Image: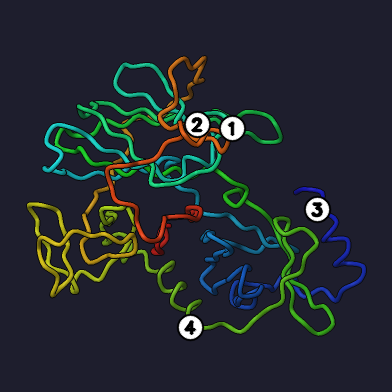
Amino acid sequence: MNSIFYFLCILTTITLSLFMNNDASAQSLAGRYGGVQDGFCLFDNGRFFLYGYATLVPGTYHVEKDHIRFVPDKPANTFIVFARENKALQDSVRMYFNGFERGKTFIQFNDGKTRRVFNEDANCFKPPYIYEAAAVPSQIIFSHVDSDFGIEKMDHNTEIYSPEKKYNDFVFLYQKPNRYQEPFVGVVTKEEGETVLRTSLTGSRGLLHQPNDKEVEEMKAYLGDDKKKEEKEDVLYANRFYKLLTEIDTAEYTYNAAAGQYTAHDTPQDKLVTEYNDVSVLYKYMLLGPASKEKRAPGKVQLPPVFYTACGDPENSYRYKPLDEPSTPPDGPLPTTTAPVQIK
């Protein structure tokens, strides 16, 4: 346990009426702790999720004598790859990068040299970031360098993908590791008649217990329904501006299997989407798993980055020109999980 939690335990023992004891259980601790903007939801089945701006992290928790141990669900992969066959591209390839501006990331195609995805000290981002090439690579290698208090961590930092030849339209998502994915501890106490949750993740801040609401109950059903997760197809949907959705009501669309295209009812089949938020025409992308993972130091990178962007150099900074400018640009960070919410 870290020093913050020791402080919480001492403070609780000396000044508060201790609520937790050996009889504490998930049933007695269940509820929502926090406010509208951020907090925790503990369920009576031992599951929880923490929520905040662009953050929704589920996990499990259990009582260990005088404290609660929280273990977040870690993503299986740091990089997430979705792909589809886009016959309109013929033999060429298109790749959309989402979230890579938030970390030190690298990419390698086939046996070529490693490149940074973004230049060092990149800023003034303006998505979508789309890379196009004349031929589909048989191998795509992603790497990233994460740091913890200035110390670089590279365990299993490289993921190698070997997509089928038919796939030529890709969506790449980068889930930068963060502190919300690491186990942490907490205590539930009574303070001035109120039930409060304190955790090593939130420091000395106490989160008041709140009544459950409809949205919390719906999320509980989703997190606890393992059968639904097993049956759920690993797909992603996107319009031509790469507005990404993890779920749609397929009953509201007509599906063209040959084109992998969903068209909303009463929408012309040849409609061209001109608005970023227009989801009347969507394309279906399938999840691809990595062929292998390994530890690999990027070494000296000699090639230019895939994307260059700098506030002080707007003329040379990347802009994707083939698509018309969407009315509402896709700004905002990527949520830290692949929960069924819109990815911005």
On the image, numbered disc 1 is attached to which residue? 121
Q: Quadrant of the C terminus?
A: bottom left
On the image, numbered disc 2 is attached to which residue? 144
On the image, numbered disc 4 is attached to which residue? 214
Q: Secondary structure at mark 1?
A: loop
Q: Is residue 189 above or below residue 3?
A: below
Q: Is residue 180 above or below residue 303?
A: below
Disc 1 marks which amino acid? Asp
* Mark 4 or 1: the one toward you: 1
Q: Which residue ends up furthest to the right in the rendered image? A: 14
Q: Position of residue 196 (x, y in %)?
A: 74, 74
Q: CA distance from mark 2 to mark 3?
A: 30 Å
* Mark 3 or 1: the one toward you: 1
On the image, numbered disc 3 is attached to which residue? 4
Q: CA distance from mark 3 to mark 1?
A: 33 Å
Query: Counting residues from the N terminus, which is met first, the one under dot 3 or under dot 1?
Result: 3
Q: Position of residue 328 (x, y in %)?
A: 40, 60
Query: Counting residues from the N terminus, which is met first, the one under dot 4 or under dot 1?
Result: 1
Q: CA distance from mark 4 to mark 1?
A: 43 Å
Mark 1 residue crowding within 10 angstroms, few (<14) / some (14–19) / many (20+):
few
Query: Counting residues from the N terminus, which is met first, the one under dot 3 or under dot 4?
Result: 3
Horizontal side of residue 93 vs 100, given as left or right = left
Horizontal side of residue 331 vs 241, given as left or right = right
* Mark 2 or 3: the one toward you: 2
Please name the colour scheme applied to the rendered image: rainbow
Disc 3 marks which amino acid? Ile
